Image: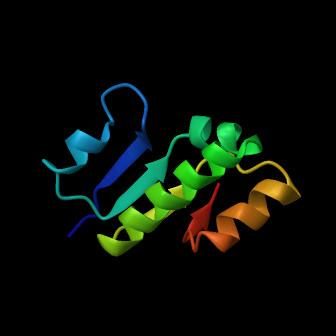
Amino acid sequence: MFNVTIYDLGSGYSSLSMRANLNADFVKLDRQFLENTSSESGQVLYRHISQALEEMHYTVIAEGVENDTEISLVLACNIDIAQ
C-alpha cells in the first residue's frame, strides 16, 4: 500500500478543484499562502483552507515554515506537519 500526496496546493495544477478529483492522503499547502499571512485577510484564508482540509480528513503539511510567527499560526491551525 502507498499514500498519495497533493503537493503545493494553490499553485500550478494543484488547485482546489483538482482536490475534488483525486483521492489523496496528504495535502501540502504551498508556501505562498504562508507568505501572505502578514495581513489579516491572508491569515483568515490560511485558517479556512487548513480547516477545510482537516474536515476532509487530510493530513495537512505546511510548506516553508521559517520563523516563530509562522510556527504559531501553523500550530493554531492544527496543521499536522510543518516543513
- Which residue is most to the left? 21
**Camera-nearest residue between 44 and 16:** 44
Residue at the farthest top position: 12
The number of numbered badges drawn on the structure is: 0
Q: Is residue 1 left or right of residue 63?
A: left
Closer to the camera, 62 or 76? 76
Judging from the image, the colouring scheme is rainbow
Which residue is found at the position 38% from the left and 64% from the top?
52
Q: Position of residue 30 (x, y in %)?
A: 52, 40
Q: Position of residue 80 (x, y in %)?
A: 54, 71
| Residue 51 percent coordinates (x, y) | 45, 67
Residue located farthest toward the front when viewing the structure as drawn: 41
Query: Which residue appears at 76% of the width and 62% of the height?
Result: 71
- Indicate the position of residue 6 as horizontal and vertical percent values: 34, 48
In this rendering, the answer to whether 39 lies above or below 79 is above
Relative depth, front residue between 61 and 34: 34
On screen, residue 3 versus residue 53, left or right, reads: left
- Report the quarter where the N terminus lies: bottom left
Residue at figure coordinates x 70%, y 48% from the top left: 40
Which quadrant: the C terminus? bottom right
In this rendering, position of residue 58 left or right of residue 36: left
Q: Up-down: is 1 above or below 83?
A: below
